[in-house]
Image (spheres, helix red, strand yellow):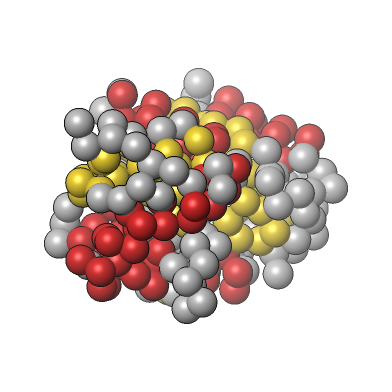
Amino acid sequence: MAITVRIPTVLRPATGGQAVIEGEGTTIGAVLGRIATDHPGVKPQLFHDDGALHKFLNVYINDDDVRYLGGLEAPVADGDEITLLPAVAGGAV
Amino acid sequence: MSNSQRDAMVAHVIRALPHEGCGLLLGSLDGRVSEVVLSSNVAASARVYEIDPKVLLKSYRTAESRGEEVVGCFHSHTHTDAFPSPTDIAQAPDPTWHYVLISLRAVPPTVRSYRIVDGEVSEETVDITEN
């Protein structure tokens, strides 16, 4: 078993076209940090400059949004599927 | 897009008042819409919207299981025209998407659709078919 990370279409140019990456780490922060190290082009889409998770990125562990699982500290285990999706947002301002 | 899909979007954003209403479009990237997915606006605001992250994940999974794609989204502007705002353009995540804007500024509501590529907005026609 392994951790799989599903990469959305808009981030694939920064991951060499990969749609699925094998994740390593015991927290979501560690898994995403490793991806940012391996694919530096994707880092600004994952994290703000202060290291916080990017506001307009939704990160899910299996069916759950990590915002409700402890954010970057959310634990990840073998067999988990992590999905990244850009938030769909905007407005009249 | 069918007449009933258009009506479902418009009815949803009217029900969402005073907030902006929003949802997703499933179908094929050539612009055929197979399903309109209604979402709550988790921003709960008259000036901004955000699709419910749970609806977003579920819609991607539904589309994938059918061999389809999430091809775009719709949202309302409650008091301004059906044209993408600077916020919409800055936050447009996907150059392949269709961004549908519904203006409730006048009666009847206006439905228009746009592509947003590298900050450049271009309008496209919305073809409404019989159901």
Find residue A38 and report its image quarter: bottom left
Q: Which residue sits at x=20%, y=46%? A: A22
Q: Quadrant of residue B118?
A: bottom left
Q: Position of residue A20 (x, y in %)?
A: 21, 45
Q: Please give left or right for residue A22 compared with residue B40 in the image.
A: left
Q: Is residue A74 left or right of residue A35?
A: right
Q: Position of residue A28 (x, y in %)?
A: 41, 51
Coordinates of residue B56 in the picture (x, y in percent): 50, 39
Q: State the residue at coordinates (34%, 70%).
A: A43
| Farthest-out residue, bottom | A49
Question: Can residue B87 be seen?
Answer: yes
> Who is closer to the viewer here, A74 or B65?
A74
Image quadrant in which you'd find residue A39: bottom left
> Which of these two is toward me, A66 or B57?
A66
Instruction: Report whether residue B59 is seen.
Output: no
Residue drawn at 66 percent across, 53 percent down: B49
Q: How many marks?
A: 0
Residue at left 71%, top 40%?
A: B13
Tell me: B39 left or right of A5: right
